[in-house]
């Protein structure tokens, strides 16, 4: 599909928001930082100038909280990026519930006629090793959601995983052991993000 401008709504948690270097909410930027390069969306838009991102990431939210504001986040969008799940793991919530919420957001995006992609969950250095099995299990579910729904999976996890330290991001790719650094976001935007099949 060829369009001069492709409006992309990204819904998710702090990974989408760009914390700790950026936040889409101007009121939070004094706390979180004011560096727009701390968003994978920034780098993806440099690579493909047709992309106009609308960042609806909110730090700390679980999948159910993200899903509750989905409809308010996609007005006028062409493409939806669904991201979330790490805060469910952080709070000890069942990953089956997170997977169900992610599945429902994908389905809702398709129902609204949007092109949809879904990301998997990043490695979590500060949560390693305890959280790693749950992250891998949830990511298997996310891959199954993508396959069943016929949507593309954005491989966020593998793009930032340190091959020498499985289950963790490379030190230079994380700002604080929880979130990507600017360099991590650059890798996500340049190497992991892509438009849905047929929108290239």
Image (spheres, rainbow, N blue to C red):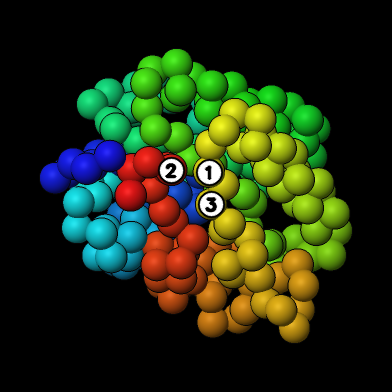
Dot 3, crowdedness within 10 Å: few (<14), some or many (≥20)? many
The residue singled out by tag 1 in the image is 152
121, above or below 186, in the image: above
Instruction: State the image coordinates of residue 43 (x, y, percent, origin top left).
Output: 32, 65
Instruction: State the image coordinates of residue 124 (x, y, percent, origin top left).
Output: 68, 62
Ranked by sequence position, the earlier of labels 2 and 1 is 1
The residue singled out by tag 2 in the image is 197
Decide if residue 141 is on the left or right side of residue 101: right
Instruction: State the image coordinates of residue 76 (x, y, percent, origin top left).
Output: 23, 26
Q: What mark, if any, has residue 154 been given in the picture?
A: 3
131, above or below 198, in the image: below
Q: What mark, if any, has residue 66 been given in the picture?
A: none
> Mark 1: which secondary structure?
strand
Q: Quadrant of residue 164?
A: bottom right
Closer to the eye: label 3 or 2: 2
Decide if residue 182 is on the left or right side of residue 158: left
Q: Quadrant of residue 55?
A: top left
Decide if residue 192 is on the left or right side of residue 161: left
Instruction: State the image coordinates of residue 142 (x, y, percent, origin top left).
Output: 67, 40
Decide if residue 62 is on the left or right side of residue 110: right
Q: Quadrant of residue 5?
A: top left
Closer to the eye: label 3 or 1: 1
* Residue at 44% from the left image edge and 56% from the top image edge: 193
Ranked by sequence position, the earlier of labels 3 and 2 is 3
- Whether residues under marks 3 and 2 lie with C-beta atoms below 8 angstroms apart, the answer is no
Dot 1, crowdedness within 10 Å: few (<14), some or many (≥20)? many
* Residue at 39% from the left image edge and 67% from the top image edge: 190
- Whether residues under marks 3 and 1 lie with C-beta atoms below 8 angstroms apart, the answer is yes
- Whether residues under marks 2 and 1 lie with C-beta atoms below 8 angstroms apart, the answer is yes
């Amino acid at each position: 599909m060829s369009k001069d401008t492709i409006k992309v709504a990204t819904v998710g948690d702090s990974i989408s928001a760009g914390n700790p270097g950026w936040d889409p909410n101007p009121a939070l930027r004094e706390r979180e930082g004011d560096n727009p390069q701390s968003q994978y969306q920034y780098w993806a838009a440099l690579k493909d100038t047709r992309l106009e991102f609308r960042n609806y990431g909110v730090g700390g939210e679980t999948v159910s909280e993200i899903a509750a504001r989905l409809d308010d986040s996609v007005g006028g969008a062409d493409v939806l990026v669904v991201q979330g799940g790490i805060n469910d793991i952080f709070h000890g919530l069942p990953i089956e519930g997170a997977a169900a919420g992610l599945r429902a957001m994908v389905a809702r995006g398709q129902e609204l006629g949007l092109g949809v992609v879904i990301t998997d969950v990043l490695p979590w250095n500060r949560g390693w090793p305890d959280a790693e099995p749950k992250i891998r299990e949830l990511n298997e579910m996310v891959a199954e959601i993508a396959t069943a729904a016929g949507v593309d999976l954005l491989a966020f996890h593998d793009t930032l995983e340190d091959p020498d330290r499985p289950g963790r991001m490379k030190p230079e790719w994380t700002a604080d052991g929880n979130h990507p650094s600017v360099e991590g976001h650059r890798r996500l935007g340049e190497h992991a993000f892509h438009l849905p099949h047929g929108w290239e």
